[in-house]
Each structure stands twice: as C-alpha cells, then as structure tokens.
Image: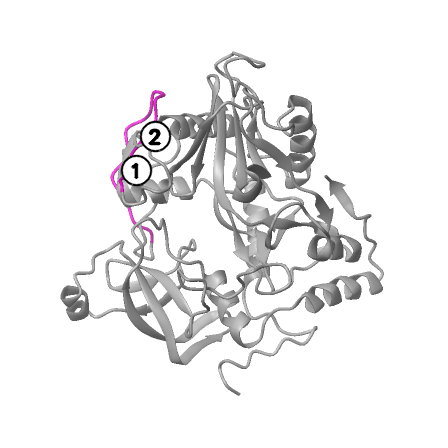
Amino acid sequence: MSSHDIRRPFKRPAISDQQRRRELSLLRQSQNRHDAQLQARRLASTVLSLQSDYNSSSQEQQVDLEVTDELESCPEEVEDDYGHRKDAHDLRQATKLRGPDARLWFAKQLMLPEWMIDVPDKLNTDWYVFARPAGKRCFVVSSNGTTISRLRNGVLLHRFPSALPNGARTNNSKAAQSYCILDCIFHESDETYYVIDGVCWAGISLYECTAEFRFFWLNSKLAETGACDVPSAYHKYKFSALPVYNCDTEGLQTAYAGQVPYVKDGLLFYNKHAQYQTGNTPLSLVWKDEHCSQYVIDTDNKGQVLSQQQLVLELLDDGRLATSDDPPVIFGCLLGEFMQKTALHRGDLIKFAIGEGGLVVVDSKVEKADLKYLGKSNRARAFADSYSKVLFQHAARYSPLRIEHLFASISSYVEGGNSTQDAEMAG
C-alpha cells in the first residue's frame, strides 16, 4: 500500500494520538490552577502598550512588547529536553521583546485549534460546532476609554471607540480595572468583529471557565452592552456573536450547510469542558472541505493550489526540524555543512516541500518525510506549522476526512444507546 493511501472507513484505527492528548489536556487543566485574573490583566496591559503601533501593511517592521505593570525580571532562556526553547517570558515576566520573539510571544496567547485528523470520541455530547468566519484572527482589548485590536503576530489592526466595557470615552465604566479581552475574527467585507471566544469581561477573567460557560456569558453580555448594534460615532465597528450548536446531527448539519452573514472558512469544534488554553490545543479543532471553505488545500500567494504540499518547520540547535507543538514533533535533521552554506541559525522558520517520497506516519509518529528545502519562511510568521496541520493537509490531498465520517460517528454513538441534546446552544 502506498504511503499516500490512508484509508478512512468509519470504524478504523486512529492515525494520530489526538484523542489521547485530548484526554491529557482535560486532566491537566483540572490539575494546573493559576492566577487567571492576573494573567488576563497582564495580557490586556501588553496589548495596549506594544511600542510599535503600525498597521498590518507594515509587516516587516519590528514588534516590541512592553508591559506597563510592575513585572518580575526575566529569567535566562532555558531549553526543554527536546532542545526547544521554552517561553521564559510569561505574562508576568514579558518586559521587552523584539522582532520574532515578540511575534512568537503574542501568538502564543491565543487558543489555537488543532486540525481535526480523527473524529473525537463523544462528538455529539461533548462538543460544540460553529461555522468559522473567513478573516483576520485577532485579540480585541477595551480599556481606559479606547479599544485596540491586534493580529496574532502583534501587529496593530485597529484603534477605535466601542461599546465594550470601558471601550470609549463616553460609555459605561471608567474604572481602571474594567477592561475586556475578546478573541475575534475580523471579517473585512462587512467590517464586523465576529467573537469566537473570550478571555476577560469587565475585569473578570474567563480563562478557567469552561467553553460552555464562556459562550453563554459572551452572548448575554455582548447583547447587554450594545456592542452588536450598528456602528455609530462612539462605536465604530460592529461585534457579532456566532451561532454555536451542540454537535449532534442537526447541529452539525446547520453549521455545515446553514446560511450565515459571512464567508465561511471551515468549521470550529470546541470541547464543552475546555478552558481557555493558550497555544495549540486538541480541545479545539478546525475542519474544512470544499463546501464550507474556499481554501482547503494550501495555496500560493495567487490563490493557486500548490503542486506539492509545503510545510514550515523550526530549526533547533542540533539541526533538528520541529513543529510548533509542545512537545515538538521532529521531521528530520539538517547537516551542519548545509546550515553553514545556507546561513541558517537556531530558531529560523524554514519552508519545505514534500517530495515524491511522501510522508509516512506509523503509530502516530513520522517514520519518513521526503523534505525538499525551499528557503526561509516569511519574516512576519510567528511559528512553525503544527503536526496536526501537516497531517490534515497531507490527508486532504489523498484521503480526506469527510463530512460523512463526522455524521457516521454521531449516528453510531446515538445508535449505541447514548442520548444527545437539542441543537442550538447560543446564538
């Protein structure tokens, strides 16, 4: 059987360890309690005080981070057992970062979905689903009478007045502790911020709340403030909550085929028990096909599908090539002579194509990857591809996970005697 011939019958062995890592993530979040209120306050301070307030057209300029609150001094940079740099600058220790380090720090504050490689267990009882808007992923922070949005690499998107808590000079609370942090997608065609999640509302941290509570809370509070109203002099951009459904047959069908006021870019799945976890997490998943997204397989800058799959990996100290996962997945190793010849250094993000030898995965591990060097990645990029994205893109070319597999999983669970809930949770 060819390495490309990854069959997907309904009841099949998983091709990844995604389910095991989901279970570990749920266990870890119940064990690791931290000061969520302080974390939210530090993030808000950082978003508002980034020194380089340029717009997204100035991608090549440096991004500097500076937190205005009293901070602990930064420890020396350390490495984990994989030779991967740990993020020594947490929310209380990020004093000044520049260039790639700043972009990486900022991007890691978002909850980043993994790509759905295998259908999760209990999809119809433990998960929500909604149609993801196409657009620019960003943080939106309202504080001190103004509102700022920043892209995932720290670049300023907009500075504007809003109806969010303390988001304009004329509205609601003026207390310094009243601020708001939303995880949004800015949809350019209708100039709307679609709220996909929330980190903090009116100074109250939502980090350790379940997705079930966060979605309910945000829908209620957004409507109360008038943030979803049409734009006005003191509310420049409209905000909109997304319709979120229980991932049963009806909910999945509605999210997949139902009409929405924005351009769809796939489906997002959230585990109902998931807290807001920064970085890559298997408790949030993205899935696409040609029906619900214009771009399923990666394209070039002209929108053309690439003849070979491409991926971006990070160069570690010893020449190993790693994904952005924690711990990273190693795809290969570069020789020192090649690194010197091409002026590559630790931390560089490098673009490769997968050659005719393909990608072979055995027992959830990369056994072989025919990597063809293409050069350094775009400087504005914050980090390497995740392992789940590489596998999803590979499967999309040869044997995609289809919507029928998701419906079959739900039907099998219901036929097994397990109950399901009614469709819409929030809207």
Residue at x 41% of width, y 74% of height? 308
Q: Is residue 100 left or right of residue 395?
A: left
Residue 153, quarter of picture: top left
Question: Please, what is the three-letter code of the amino acid marked with disc 1?
Answer: Val
Residue 377, quarter of picture: bottom left
On screen, residue 27 above or below 191:
below
Q: For residue 33: magenta?
A: no
**Percent x, y for residue 413?**
78, 62
Placement of the C terminus among the 4 image quadrants? top right
Q: Give the total of numbered labels.
A: 2
Could one spot residue 87 in this view of the protein?
Answer: no
Q: Secondary structure at mark 1?
A: loop
- Determine which residue is flagged by label 2: 50
Q: Is residue 348 left or right of residue 30?
A: left
**Percent x, y for residue 385?**
41, 58
Question: Please, what is the three-letter code of the amino acid marked with disc 2?
Answer: Leu
On screen, residue 404 above or below 77:
below
Tell me which segment is drawn in magenta: 61-80
On screen, residue 45 above or below 312:
above
On screen, residue 111 above or below 94:
below
Q: Are marks 1 and 2 in contact (CB under 8 Å)?
A: yes
- Characterize the magenta stretch by its predominant secondary structure: loop
Residue at x 52% of width, y 11% of height? 174
**Percent x, y for residue 176?**
48, 14
Q: For residue 76: magenta?
A: yes
Residue 63 - label: 1
Could one spot residue 98 in this view of the protein?
Answer: yes
Q: Nearer the viewer, residue 87 or 371?
A: 371
Q: Secondary structure at mark 2?
A: loop
